[in-house]
Image: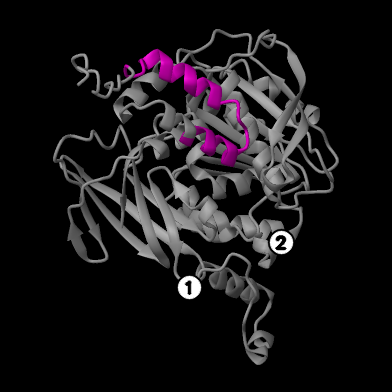
Amino acid sequence: MIALPPGGNAQKKRIKPPPPTKEALAKAFLDVLPIQNPKDRDKAIRRLLKEKKAPLVKWEKALHALPWPPLPLSPALERGKRIRRKIPLYTGSDGMLDTEVHGYIPGAKRPERGFALLLASHGTGGQGQHELATWIHFAEGAPMVILAASEQQANQGYRFSEQERQTQLSLLRWARLHLPIDPDRVFVAGTSRGGHISWDLGLRHPGLWAGILPCIGGPRLALQRGQNNLRLLPNLVGVPIHDFQGLKDDPGLIWNLRLAFRELKEMGHKQVHFHTFPDIGHSFDLGNAGLEDFFAKTRRNAHPDSLLLAASRLAEARRSWVQIRGFAREVQDELRLKVRANEWKRLNEEERKRFAHRYAKDRTALVEAKILSRAPLTIRVKAKRARKVRLLLPRWLWQGDKDARLKIRYKGRKRSPKPKSDKFLYLVDFARHLDFDSAPVAYVDL
């Protein structure tokens, strides 16, 4: 009989690797941030979470320890002078497109939280340099970075395409990654085609902006190809608007704008400024509007107590801490008007427009959410044509205390659910927006 040495047949104990440090997590996350395609970035984050085992609180500390901006340009863009740069931007189904961007970085002292940012969109046939010239004299007073992207494809007016929207959203993300930008002082503006873009971005992505400044452009009543965004007016309640418009311009545009401002005021929006010029057509004047003061002092409300959210597309159904994840059957994005022929014939042009506007609103989901109390956190939610609603709770709203409960009033019932934590949700949101005030540390499905 052969004697075995003590412990010779025992399995070797697996040695657990030490938990990753905050610095290691931050460094690993920096490798993810340059990925522009959201699907590829999400996959990289999933791999990262498998490789780096750490609780959500540690990830939060790691992200807060990132340099700001997280990926500063080297060499840095020259300050106090106009810039022109080719930037590859993600544009949705059109993929990455090299985009000529004209801009200006203020020479003024950098504020503690960073510069304001204005994304400016040019008119039909124009280029970024033309729109930059419209706004550049506001840059030093704010102080404010101005970026104006030139259209990469057919430059024949606003096509209400995902490529055009994503170009602006990708440029915003590029600026947040590489420049010291204050997330609460981001504005969107534009002329003619760019005015349409400003309205469209404001209506479809309202949680991003400190204010919108459309010039001789407006929201759209047309029902085809999902262009209608007048149905989304509730999203702009609480977002300051300065609109500049010659009243001898296209009558349809003027009608849409008058309707929009009337309804916004009826919904209680007090920060609306409709600057009209009776004696001119497709033109405007930025003087005497107090924009120097507006840019210097206006901030996004990053901690809103009440929200309105209207949507007909799930990809756009998010505003701050409220998200729609499922629509009722009657919600339609691409609309085909259904009305009896004899009834339609009886309507004049004004009545037909109002009918179409009501038709679109009746096929749009609408959620109203209000924080009734912070201690305990109590939220009332009302929904129309929204089948699934999610509350996305950032750290300023949810501290995550042990055994804490959230009080919900929804569909006439009171509930006390325990919010669920999700590291993937938190990291994906932060990687997309680079905004601690919107990144959810927990969520509740209603």
Crowdedness near tag 1: few (<14), some (14–19) or many (≥20) residues, C-alpha within 10 Å: few
Counting residues from the N terminus, which is met first, the one under dot 2 or under dot 1? 2
**Residue 20 shown in magenta:** yes
Residue range highlighted in magenta: 18-46
Assign a secondary structure to mark 2: helix
SS category of the residue bearing label 1 = loop
**CA–CA distance between discs 2 and 1?**
31 Å
Q: Is any atom of residue 90 visible in this view? A: yes
- Report if the CB atoms under discs 2 and 1 are less than 8 Å apart: no
Residue extending furthest toward the front? 1
Is residue 267 in view? no
Q: x and y percent of residue 16 in the render?
A: 30, 21
| Residue 89: image location, x then y, percent | 70, 33
Q: Is residue 367 above or below residue 98?
A: below
Q: In the depicted view, which residue is nearer to us: 67 or 253?
A: 67
Residue 376 is drawn in which quadrant?
A: top left
Residue 66, position as x, y percentages in the image: 45, 16
Q: Give coordinates of residue 217: x percent, y percent.
A: 70, 48
In depth, the one of 390 and 384 nearer the eye is: 390
Q: Identify which residue is drawn at 54% across, 17% down.
A: 180
**Magenta segment main secondary structure:** helix
The residue under label 2 is: 252
Identify the residue at horizontal 65%, vertical 82% (top origin): 347
Residue that label 1 marks: 329
Image point 56% across, 35% down: which residue?
41
Q: Is residue 198 left or right of residue 112?
A: right
Task: Please state which amino acid type lies under the numbered disc 1.
Answer: Arg
Q: Which one is in front, 430 or 290?
A: 430
Q: Quadrant of the N terminus?
A: top left
